[in-house]
Image (cartoon, rainbow, N blue to C red):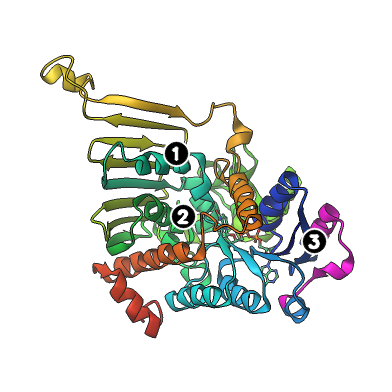
Amino acid sequence: MITVSLLGAGNRGLDTYATIAQQEFDDVKFLCCIDEDPERLSQFQKRFGVSNESLYKSTDEFFLRPKQSDLLIIATQDTTHYELAKKALNKGYDLILEKPVALDVKELLELEELSNKLGRTVIVCHVLRYHKMWQMIKKIVDEGKLGKIITISHHENIGHYHYAHSYARGSWRKKETSGPLVLTKSSHDIDLLYYLVGSRVKRVASFGSLSYFHSENAPIGHGERCESCAVKKDCRYEGERMYTSFGGFYPLFTKNKYTRKAVREGLRSTDYGRCIYTMDHNVVDHQSSILEFENGVCATFNLNAFTRKMHRFIKVMCEYGEIIADERKIEVSTFDLQPLIKGFLKHILHLDRKIIKRIRLYKPWDVSKYFGHGGADRLFVKSAFESYRAKKESITPISQSVHSHVVALALEEARITGKTILIEEFIEYCSKNKTYRE
Ligand SMILES: NC(=O)c1ccc[n+]([C@@H]2O[C@H](COP(=O)([O-])OP(=O)(O)OC[C@H]3O[C@@H](n4cnc5c(N)ncnc54)[C@H](O)[C@@H]3O)[C@@H](O)[C@H]2O)c1
């Protein structure tokens, strides 16, 4: 039996991790819940049938009590993770910890050191490492048939409407209250590159800005809120259109009530009904980065809001072949085929390569299988609890996440200063100072 407490019963904590664990395991028992929002506590209580004494409105109240369970899941918002994780480790909990682990290099290193010193397990929610596509690419790379990786080109396509929801109007819109976009959105991507390459990053350069979603691009006659906007019928980010049209974005602000009335009420009272062009957000809407790893591999990484779809796309170029993948399919080809047709024709007909594998990850109608980060949320929960039960290291231990987080922060530093940043120097500087230069 594994006993668990849940700190932060929101979209990730309750609706994702606890729900999946309850569906997948009979021997995982949720005992306590801590959340500032009484509605979320009551939803947890209904789902897990615990007594009122097992519900806590404040973390102070919870940490005053003796250790309540083997594991604690921390799924509150970004700025709280460091303090809460530190308290929990000192209290004796092993952790399932949401990313970002912390927002500052010093704090990241401190948490890693503390968990090592106390011998605690910390499984970081880098769920994409568990995704079918990334596991398959990792296996193909490690098999070595394509030789060593030389370069990687990776794209994180945020999706323009997802950017509008989360990064212009939502919780991750300000660097000061959640961290830079390259950390909050892309610590996953940096982590995946680190996982595939299997070597630490040596140096980085990065460029990008908030180029479009600001007041200079607001349509003439726009209002402060969509409700009262004179030009809303021509705006693709108008609230009701975004959240109630077929295929629209999930109205997470309505707390699990998906009626048109609940959406209208939510749009009236929350930031999700404010004009996207005059929001107070300051995170970039595009960022292009270059990473050189210690083993010589180079990678380019494009983070971009201006895409129709929300998906990741990668090309891994190796000594004897290449892997191209886009979350729906993986194509692996080698360069070694004897030419069937000579000359230019062979080249334009693509006969100078041999496709050795074409894997369709999902059929278009398998919607339920790719729900929740392409199915990765479920695979993560299953693997995390299984490794914990077997006392084996997880696929996403804190030691690896800390490096990807540090690299993400170095990318932001490189973007701001316009300099190439050496990771070791950056770590040394930040371990004595704050992560960002004033
Ligand atoms: N791993 C991933 O792929 C992934 C995806 C999305 C979000 N996230 C991260 O997960 C975390 C949670 O995101 P979410 O979308 O579930 O947020 P959310 O707002 O839906 O949930 C957070 C919950 O924590 C509670 N809370 C916040 N501070 C608290 C405190 N000090 N004490 C007690 N309760 C507190 C809130 O009331 C809320 O119910 C964030 O850090 C986010 O960046 C990770």
Dominant secondary structure, magenta: helix
Residue 298 % position (x, y): 25, 53
The answer to which image quadrant residue 46 occupies is bottom right
Which label number is shown at residue 421? none
Where does residue 267 sit, x and y in percent of width and height?
66, 54
* Quarter of the image where ligand 1 sits: bottom right
Q: Residue at x 44, y 78 (%)?
A: 106
Start-end of magenta stretch: 42-59
Q: Classify 10 Å Cα crowding around label 3: few (below 14), some (14-19), many (20 and above).
A: few
> Mark 3 and mark 2: span between their CA atoms?
30 Å
What's the amino acid at mark 3?
Answer: Glu
Q: Amino acid at mark 1?
A: Met
Q: Residues within 10 Å of mark 1 (few under 14, many from 20)?
A: some
Residue 164: x %, y % from top left: 51, 52
Residue 136 tag number? 1
Q: Is residue 263 visible?
A: no
The Cα–Cα distance between marks 2 and 1, rounded to whole angstroms, is: 17 Å
Label 3 vs label 2, nearer the camera = 2
State if disc 2 and disc 3 touch (CB < 8 Å): no
Of labels 3 and 2, earlier in sequence is 3
What residue is at 40 percent from the left and 77 percent from the top?
435
Q: How dense is the environment of label 2, judged by Cα within 10 Å: few (below 14), some, or many (20 and up)?
A: many
Which amino acid, mark 2?
His
Asked if residue 158 is positioned above or below residue 332 in the image, the reply reads below
Secondary structure state at the residue bearing disc 1: helix
Q: Is label 1 in contact with label 3 (beta carbons under 8 Å)?
A: no
The residue indicated by pointer 2 is 188
